[in-house]
Each structure stands twice: as structure tokens, then as C-alpha cells.
Amino acid sequence: MMHSLLIVLLSVAAAAAAQTTVIEGAPERYPFEPGDRVIFETRLIECPVGEFAEGVEVPHGAYECARFQDRIWLRPFDTGTVLYVRLPKPLPEEFSLEFPVWASRTGCAWTEFRLHAPAFLDEIERDQYARARHALLGGHISCDEARFGVNREPGELHFSLRARLAPERIHRIAVQVRRGQARFFVDGKRVAHRPFRPEAPMTALSFWFHRRSTTPTPYAEAPVLIGDIRIRGYSKPETPPEPEKDLIRDLGAVETPEGLKVTLSEAILFDLGKWELKPEAWETLEKLTRLARLRDAEVRVEGHTDDVGAEQFNLVLSELRAHVVALALARLGVAPARLSPKGYGETRPVAPNDSDANRLRNRRVEVILARTRS
């Protein structure tokens, strides 16, 4: 009887996997984390409206501190305005940069920010076009998109990494440089990254303001606004991610004499008394598949129940659930020959069946990844 159900189970597992597979990558897994050592920060809350912000120079054009949506912003008065910050010291190998931005859709205002090599500071006061030279990292932020780019050597940047922006909303732009990578974030989510090991120090940050199309509305009334700028270093180097350790942590796996054990609660996988996988179970099973594929030994899938109901029913239910999980793992990429599903019914409780909470603990599927073959 059990073998006659395997084809049906496989079709159910395959259909559910096709509908619910979740793609997980850097954007979903790694949020922006700012540095913990201040290198440069504006404090625009202390800048009176109509005045200049401390540390923000304006070699070309004009700007002021202005209030908008209960915040203080850097407000350029016209297209072509250039602002820059002379950093107190060259940026370290690992650092973060972040600032909020708001861009008017009238004429589609935009700004370009750049981190520059030292030659920029020698030229920008007399030559406004120096804003585009000697750049190592930067971005183009407009009313509807963000683009980013990096250089290994100082020069003009090509902004090729794109992300869409909602018009006339405050967006938080951030850059994280760690482990030889430049990572770009919009509203806390990573949108792009590139290898980045610059061959020159970065000693200045600039902003250049413009708009995409002409409009009778003065730029000062429909500009890009820049909020508080924060540049920070990191006191500790970043630890490279280790796939197995990350998955062990996420799944709550524990080492046992038999191998690495992952306990999957009924609440994660199944409805009460059922053996069809819940749609939300697939994200956990995909992580379990990745963990299993990092090893090459047997994968035991063991179903367990509480003692409510007939003993024979519980045995069959646990067997069905073990096979469903095993078939799902096979569908997701675990070699079928490695899988050993078995149901134990109510015979192996982990807690007395004397309360709802304990019975829930007993309704589970345990997946044991045997120790890797030597």
C-alpha cells in the first residue's frame, strides 16, 4: 500500500515546489549594516534654515539648509551646483556611507555622488568639471531610479548597476565596502554589488545636481534634497559567510551521536492530522536541502506523532509525512539514494503527552544528516 502512494506523493510534492519555490540571495539575506566608528557626519538638525551645513563646501552654485517634511535637508538652488566634503582622513579599507534623498519628479531632478581620489581636491575649486574626474565609487540618483558604479583606478564613473525608485518618496541610499566588495543598498535592501579594491585612497565626497528635462519650475522649487550624510568605519573585519554554519543556525540543527539533527515541527510542515505540505514549508525545506547537499552521507527522515487517536492511524500518518518530506527533498535536489524515510508513530515521544504544548512537540519530523563518510 505504501509503495503505491509514492507516485501520488511525488506529484503533490513537485506541484507544491513549483508553486512556492523561494529565491534567496544577498538582497533577501544581508541587510545594510553601518560601521560603528564615525569618520564624518553632518548634523543638519543643528543647521538653521537658510544657513550652510558645517563641513559641506559649495565651490560651484549655491545651497542652503531647508526644512521639508519635518526634516532639515541640503537644498541646491540651481542645476550645476556642486557640493563636496573634505574627509578628515582617507577612508579605510572597510567603511559605510549613507544618506537619505528626495527627488522631485518635476523635470526629474537627479544628483550624482562620488568618492574621489586626492587630485579632486586640487582641482574642484577652479574647475567644476573636476566633479566627474578622479572618482572611484559613486551613484546617480534620480526621481525614478538609482544607478551605481565603481572604478579600480581614479577616473570617470560608468553607472551601470540599476534599481527602480518610487517617485517623490524619501529613499535611503547606502554603500558598504567590505571584504573587497562595494555593496549598494536602497532602503536597506542590497540592489547591487561589485568587486572593489581601489588603487588610490578616497579623500572627498561630492554631489552634483541637475535635472533630466527642462521645465519652467525653478530648480530650487523642484530639486534633489540630501539629508544627513554619515560615513563610518568598522572596528572589526567582516567574517566571510560559511554556508553550512549559516544553515545550521537558521534551521536550529544540533549535533548528535547519529549526526546533525534538524527537528521540523508539525506547525511548520503540515496541518493537524494531514500529510500535505503547507506552502510555507518549502522555504525551510530548501534550506534543509542546501545543508544536505553540503554533506554526502545518508539522510534519515523520521516521522513522529503524539498519542491522540488510534495507534495504527498515527503510525501510517507518520510514515506518510516522512515520505512526503523525503520526496520533497529529492525534488529539491537531494539524491534519492541518500534518503531513508520511516514513520515511528507515537512510539518515540520527546515529551510526555500530557499537555497541548507537549503534544505539539511530539508531532514532528526529524531529519538526521549522518556523519560525512570518511
Image (cartoon, helix red, strand yellow):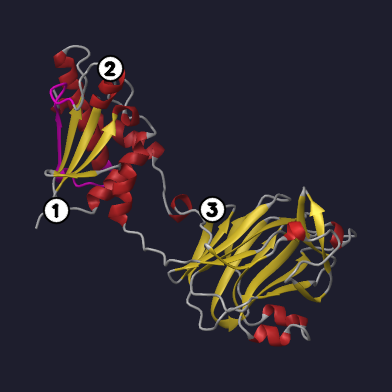
Mark 2 crowd level (few <14, some 14–19, many ≥20, 10 Å Cα): few
279 with respect to 205 (left or right): left
Residue nearest the observer in this picture, 17 or 245: 245
Q: Amino acid at mark 2?
A: Ser
Above or below — where is 99 with respect to 195? above
- x and y percentages locating residue 19 in the rendered image: 40, 37
- x and y percentages locating residue 310 in the rendered image: 17, 12
| Mark 2–mark 3 distance (CA, rounded to whole Å) | 42 Å
Residue nearest the observer in this picture, 10 or 325: 325
Residue nearest the observer in this picture, 129 or 121: 121
Tell me if I can see residue 316 in this picture: yes
- Asked whether disc 2 touches disc 1, contact meaning CB atoms under 8 Å apart, the reply is no
Mark 1 crowd level (few <14, some 14–19, many ≥20, 10 Å Cα): few
Q: Secondary structure at mark 2?
A: loop
- x and y percentages locating residue 45 in the rendered image: 74, 56
Mark 3 crowd level (few <14, some 14–19, many ≥20, 10 Å Cα): some
Q: Amino acid at mark 1?
A: Thr
* Residue 342, magenta (yes or no): yes
Residue at 53%, 57% (x, y): give it: 191
Which residue does the numbered mark 1 point to in the structure image? 372
- Asked whether disc 2 touches disc 3, contact meaning CB atoms under 8 Å apart, the reply is no
Residue at 23%, 48% (x, y): give it: 292
**Start-end of magenta stretch:** 331-349
Disc sitting over residue 189 in the figure? 3
Q: Amino acid at mark 3?
A: Lys
85 with respect to 363 (left or right): right
Q: Secondary structure at mark 1?
A: loop
Disc sitting over residue 355 in the figure? 2
Tell me if I can see residue 7 in this picture: no
Asked which quadrant contains residue 147, the reply is bottom right
* Residue 222, magenta (yes or no): no
